[in-house]
Amino acid sequence: MSARHEAASPEGGRDLSFFDPPAIDRLLGVVLELAAQVNEERYRRLALERVLAQRGVLDPVELEALGADRDFEEHARGELERAVERLFVPIVSDGHPLRPLRGLEPRERRGAGGGR
């Protein structure tokens, strides 16, 4: 890590960079934005669960029981894996400049290493 950089932003203000190379700052910005979005989604999900439970549409006990339901867990895990694979498309896809960072496509890695 190097000392903080200061440069003019396109808007004319100061752009504070804390890492060298600046790409790390951009990556950190993406991570923080994703964390903020996850927090907002969590808040909205909890609000939705509360309203549905108060109106008798959703039984909180049944909702908790889904955590032990193997079929639901398998479905949710599959959805998560597909979402993560989509996140890595720019890195692992043919023709992308960062392709050398990954040797195999996600499905090939799972097959070769046993996967989940």
Image (spheres, rainbow, N blue to C red):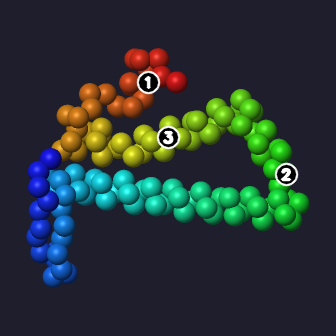
Q: Is residue 23 visible?
A: no
Residue position marked by numbered label 2 in the rendering? 59
> In this rendering, would 89 be left or right of 69?
left
Number of marks drawn: 3
Q: Indicate the position of residue 35 as horizontal and vertical percent values.
A: 45, 55
Q: Please tell me which of labels 3 and 2 falls first in the chain.
A: 2
Q: Residue at x 80, y 62 (%)?
A: 52
Find out whether the residues at labels 1 and 2 contact each other: C-beta distance under 8 Å.
no
Q: Residue at x 75, y 33 (%)?
A: 69
Q: Which mark is residue 61?
A: none
Q: Which residue is more in the foreground, 67 or 85?
A: 67
Give the secondary structure at mark 2. loop
85 vs 51: above or below: above
Kind of residue indicated by mark 1: Arg
Q: Residue at x 21, y 42 (%)?
A: 98
Residue position marked by numbered label 1 in the rendering? 110
Q: CA distance from mark 3 to mark 2?
A: 29 Å
Q: CA distance from mark 1 to mark 3?
A: 12 Å
Residue position marked by numbered label 3 in the rendering? 82
Q: Which residue is more in the foreground, 88 or 25?
A: 25
Q: Which residue is more in the foreground, 111 or 25?
A: 25
Kind of residue indicated by mark 2: Asp
Kind of residue indicated by mark 3: Arg
Q: CA distance from mark 1 to mark 2?
A: 37 Å
Most distant residue in the front direction: 3
Q: Please tell me which of labels 1 and 2 falls first in the chain.
A: 2
